[in-house]
Amino acid sequence: MKKIMLALLGIAMSFGAAAANYTEGKEYTDVKPVQNLPQVLEFFSFYCPHCYQFESVYKVPQTVEANLPEGVKMERYHVDFLGPLGADLTQAWAVAIVLKAEDKVTPILFEGIQKTQTINSKADIRNAFIKAGISGDEYDAALNSFVVKSVVAKQQNAAQDLKLRGVPALFVDGKYQVRNNGISVDKAEDYGKEFSNVVNFLVNKK
């Protein structure tokens, strides 16, 4: 089963030791630089099965964030272009960011869309937040606030500026993108850590 999941992600498997240095075109690619982005930025969608695997199987976002150098922050942005509720989920994710509830709502939203298929409307999204311990009134107030609207615009503008075409996608310094299928590991469970190593290499790259 792990091999099937790895194939879906296009992860390269190798049997040699991981390289200490990484190469443009293999583990990462240069992109046209975009200014004023978070130093480490991941784009994802709750509709994306590979994003769900990144989150629940390979623990990529969690591992990357946990191993970043001191003072380096990671942000996650949701994209509009997948699924019938893509735009609504981007708004909901902005609510999660503003309320600092990302960790609470992420598994509920992923499971409701990818696993149980129980999230099919705006009301279902709202109920997911209530399930995460956020009152309906608090969710509604945040959803209609100026600050959430600005976070929605920030997510959309970043995706447009980077000419984003697919997810999951992780960028460093607005000029490097990690190649998901360029990460070579011996075991599936090592994928998140090696991905994190590449991110840290790019964070420190001059």
Image (tube, rainbow, N blue to C red):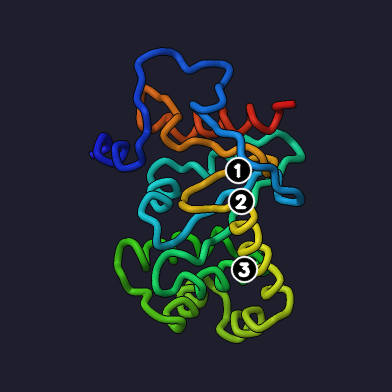
Residue 76 percent coordinates (x, y): 59, 54
Residue type indicated by callout 3: Ala
Q: CA distance from mark 3 to mark 1?
A: 19 Å
Q: CA distance from mark 3 to mark 2?
A: 19 Å
The residue at the point 49 percent across, 79 percent down is 126
Label 3, secondary structure: give it.
helix
Residue bearing mark 2: 162
Where does the image place residue 95, in percent across and percent down from the top left?
62, 71
> Which mark is drawn over residue 138?
none
Within-10-Å neighbours for mark 1: few <14, some 14–19, many 20+: many
Identify the residue at horizontal 60%, vertical 43% (top origin). Answer: 171
For disc 3, the marked residue is 94
Badges 2 and 1: C-beta atoms under 8 Å apart? yes
Judged from the image, the secondary structure of the residue bearing numbered disc 2 is loop
To which residue does mark 1 refer?
171
Pick the front one: 116 or 176: 176
Q: Kindly indicate whether the residue at mark 1 contacts the one at mark 3 (C-beta within 8 angstroms).
A: no
Place of residue 41 in the rendered image (x, y in percent of width and height, measured from the top left): 62, 48
> Residue placed at 46% from the left, 43% from the top?
59
Q: Nearer the viewer, residue 148 or 135?
A: 148
Q: Name the residue rendered at 40%, 74% in the picture.
A: 84
